[in-house]
Image (cartoon, helix red, strand yellow):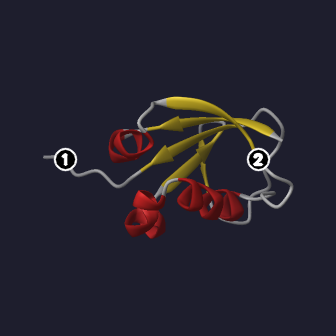
């Protein structure tokens, strides 16, 4: 399944890009599986994996959400502001 992935803040720095189109394997049907796949692809994300937020088509989602063809997934690390 093909998805568009948007990277923000530190995730963008680690991925080295702000966006990419990815062909996900059949073993990645959910947001949780996507996160596991993403950390395998970019091991530098591993320390942040438990605090990464994923937005699917502009809505924050949790692990069991099913992915669909042509979804847009935003990878948002924790940010601090002041």
**Which residue is drawn at the image coordinates 44% and 66% (left, top)?**
46
Would you call the spot at circle 2 few (<14 residues within 10 Å), some (14-19), or many (20 or more)?
some
Left or right of residue 29: residue 39: left
Quarter of the figure with the N terminus: top right
Q: Quadrant of residue 16?
A: top left
Image vertical order of residue 2 relative to residue 53, above or below: above
Would you call the spot at circle 1 few (<14 residues within 10 Å), some (14-19), or many (20 or more)?
few
Spatial distance from mark 2 to mark 1, Cα to Cα?
33 Å
Image vertical order of residue 21 relative to residue 62, above or below: above
Image vertical order of residue 50 relative to residue 1, above or below: below
Q: Quadrant of residue 78?
A: bottom left
User: Which element carries disc 1, helix, strand or loop?
Assistant: loop
In the picture, the disc for residue 24 is 2
For the residue pair 20 and 67, the one nearer the viewer reads as 20
Instruction: Return the residue at label 1.
Output: 81
Q: Position of residue 55 (x, y in %)?
A: 58, 45
Counting residues from the start of the chain, the first of labels 2 and 1 encountered is 2
Q: Position of residue 41 (x, y in %)?
A: 57, 54
**Which residue is drawn at the image coordinates 62% and 64% (left, top)?**
36
Q: Position of residue 31 (x, y in %)?
A: 68, 57
Q: Residue furthest left?
A: 82
In the picture, the disc for residue 32 is none
For the residue pair 26 and 57, the one nearer the viewer reads as 26
**Which residue is drawn at the image coordinates 22% and 52% (left, top)?**
80
User: Which element carries disc 2, helix, strand or loop?
Assistant: loop
How many numbered marks have been drawn onto this rendered protein structure?
2
Left or right of residue 17: residue 73: right
Left or right of residue 51: residue 66: right
| Contact check, label 2 and label 1, Cβ < 8 Å | no
Left or right of residue 32: residue 55: left
Tell us which disc is closer to us: 2 or 1. 2
């Amino acid at each position: 399944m093909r998805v568009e992935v948007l990277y923000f803040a530190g995730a963008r720095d680690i991925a080295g890009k702000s966006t990419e189109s990815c062909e996900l394997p059949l073993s990645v049907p959910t947001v949780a599986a996507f996160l596991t796949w993403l950390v395998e692809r970019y091991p530098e994300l591993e320390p942040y994996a438990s605090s990464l937020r994923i937005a699917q088509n502009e809505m924050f989602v949790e692990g069991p959400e099913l992915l669909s063809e042509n979804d847009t997934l935003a990878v948002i690390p924790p940010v601090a502001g002041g």
